[in-house]
Image (cartoon, rainbow, N blue to C red):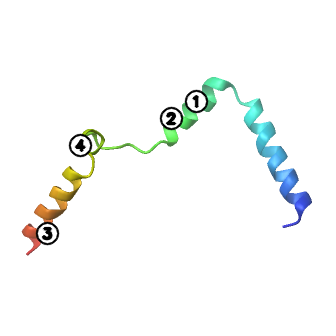
């Protein structure tokens, strides 16, 4: 990829970004965020670790 192609690509991306309305950009950003389980959000990694421990004991 030559530097001219890269500049052209970046220019297209910037123009596309600037042409989209602010509300739509905000909506797209919210939609792209992954959903986090509430237990992990509130208590960190501990619920995940306990869940793995329980699953390992069930499998054994």
Would you call the spot at circle 2 few (<14 residues within 10 Å), some (14-19), or many (20 or more)?
few
Residue at the image position 71 percent from the left and 30 percent from the top? 20
Q: CA distance from mark 3 to mark 4?
A: 21 Å
Would you call the spot at circle 4 few (<14 residues within 10 Å), some (14-19), or many (20 or more)?
few
Residues at discs 4 and 1 in contact (Cβ within 8 Å)? no
Q: Which residue is mark 1?
A: 26
Q: CA distance from mark 3 to mark 2?
A: 35 Å
Residues at discs 2 and 1 in contact (Cβ within 8 Å)? yes
In the foreground, 41 or 25: 41
In the foreground, 31 or 49: 49
Q: CA distance from mark 4 to mark 1?
A: 28 Å
Placement of the N terminus among the 4 image quadrants: bottom right
Q: Give the mark nearer the N terminus: 3 vs 1.
A: 1
Q: CA distance from mark 2 to mark 4?
A: 23 Å
Label placed on residue 18:
none
**In the image, is 44 to the left or to the right of 14?**
left
In the foreground, 51 or 45: 45
At mark 4, the secondary structure is: helix
Residues at discs 3 and 2 in contact (Cβ within 8 Å)? no
Label placed on residue 43:
4
Please identify, in this view, whether the residue under mark 2 or under mark 4 is nearer the observer.
4
Q: Position of residue 4 (x, y in %)?
A: 91, 58
**In the image, is 44 to the left or to the right of 13?**
left
At mark 3, the secondary structure is: helix
Q: Give the mark nearer the N terminus: 3 vs 4.
A: 4
Would you call the spot at circle 1 few (<14 residues within 10 Å), some (14-19), or many (20 or more)?
few
At mark 2, the secondary structure is: helix
Please identify, in this view, whether the residue under mark 3 or under mark 4 is nearer the observer.
4
Label placed on residue 30:
2
**In the image, is 36 to the left or to the right of 49?**
right
Residue at the image position 50 percent from the left and 35 percent from the top? 30
Q: Which residue is mark 3?
A: 56
């Amino acid at each position: 990829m030559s530097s001219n192609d890269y500049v052209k690509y970046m220019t297209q991306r910037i123009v596309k970004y600037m042409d989209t309305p602010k509300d739509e950009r905000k909506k797209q950003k919210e939609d792209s965020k992954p959903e986090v389980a509430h237990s992990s959000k509130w208590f960190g990694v501990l619920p995940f670790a306990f869940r793995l421990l329980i699953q390992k004991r069930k499998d054994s």
